[in-house]
Image: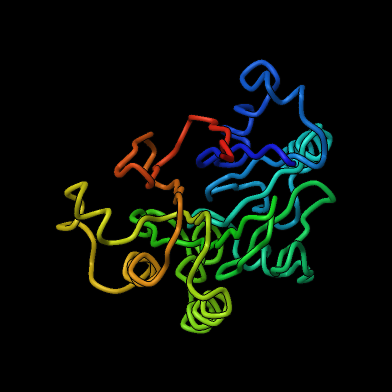
């Protein structure tokens, strides 16, 4: 059975060294059949053309013993990310950025270790006013109606029963528990995620985006610098 670890936003060159052997010594024990999942704001598919730094760190990550999986966040170059060919992997759609660096697309259900994993990247940036559209911010950060509909179709095919949910943002109900609701406008990703929370049965949900580590519920986890291993019981 594959070992699976989950961490939060890595923000490209800024924080990818979190996965160095110095900071993640368990990585030395892993193989390509094991996975590290990043909960959005991966940030290494960004520059166009690709920068030397981005090329270096993608190769660095690809050469690690494990396979890296990530959902997209809001701080991604979504146009470049979506230019990669769509492939099927473990029953869902992916973009293979490199052989061992794989983007888990929005609204997909994957079968890994005999468990069902539902993924839904994306979020609204709160710093759009300080960014330039299609240079440092992309409108595609917000999931489209088509992506939402595909998610519902895939969840319905799974009878709305999944084991793990990986997203970048959190559902509105979770944000209200954290007193974020005055700052969250109606609609958008939190409301879409709220629908999934209401409709789905799941064991655990992990998200990034908020730059802290917190277990909001016994089965809902906001994650940033932590690197947690999934305990399959």
Q: How is the model colour-coded?
A: rainbow
Task: From the viewer's side, name the closer residue of 121 and 197.
Answer: 197
Task: Locate the C terminus and report the quarter of the image it occupies.
Answer: top right
Task: Estimate the x, y position of residue 75 in percent, counting from the top left.
Answer: 51, 53
Task: Estimate the x, y position of residue 232 in percent, counting from the top left.
Answer: 59, 40
Side of 12 relative to 21 (left or right): left
Side of 200 relative to 146 (left or right): left
- Asked if residue 84 is positioned above or below residue 12 in the image, the reply reads below
Task: Estimate the x, y position of residue 91 in percent, counting from the top left.
Answer: 72, 68
At horizontal 71% and vertical 44% (from top left) the residue drawn is 68
At horizontal 49% and vertical 79% (from top left) the residue drawn is 152
Task: Estimate the x, y position of residue 188 in percent, counting from the top left.
Answer: 35, 71
Task: From the viewer's side, name the closer residue of 29 and 87.
Answer: 29
At horizontal 74% and vertical 39% (from top left) the residue drawn is 34
At horizontal 57% and vertical 38% (from top left) the residue drawn is 230
- Asked if residue 159 is positioned above or below residue 25 in the image, the reply reads below
Total marks placed = 0
**Which quadrant of the structure image shows residue 157?**
bottom right
Q: Residue furthest top?
A: 22
Side of 96 relative to 182 (left or right): right
Task: Locate the N terminus and report the quarter of the image it occupies.
Answer: top right
């Amino acid at each position: 059975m594959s070992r699976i670890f989950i961490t939060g936003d890595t923000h490209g060159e800024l924080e990818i060294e979190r996965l160095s052997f110095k900071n993640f010594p368990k990585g030395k024990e892993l193989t390509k059949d094991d996975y590290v999942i990043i909960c959005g704001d991966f940030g290494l598919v960004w520059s166009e053309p690709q920068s030397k730094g981005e090329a270096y760190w993608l190769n660095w990550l690809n050469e690690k013993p494990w396979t890296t999986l990530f959902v997209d966040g809001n701080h991604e170059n979504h146009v470049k990310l979506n230019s990669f060919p769509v492939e099927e992997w473990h029953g869902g759609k992916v973009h293979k950025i490199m052989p061992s660096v794989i983007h888990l697309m929005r609204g997909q259900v994957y079968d890994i270790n005999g468990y069902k994993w539902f993924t839904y990247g994306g979020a609204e940036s709160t710093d759009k006013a300080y960014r330039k559209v299609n240079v440092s911010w992309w409108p595609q950060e917000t999931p489209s109606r088509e992506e939402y509909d595909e998610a519902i179709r895939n969840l319905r095919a799974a009878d709305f029963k999944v084991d793990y949910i990986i997203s970048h943002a959190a559902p509105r109900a979770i944000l209200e528990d954290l007193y974020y609701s005055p700052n969250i406008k109606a609609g958008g990703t939190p409301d879409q995620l709220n629908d999934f929370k209401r409709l789905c049965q799941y064991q655990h949900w992990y998200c990034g985006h908020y730059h802290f580590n917190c277990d909001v519920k016994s089965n809902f986890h906001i994650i940033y610098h932590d690197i947690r291993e999934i305990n399959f019981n």
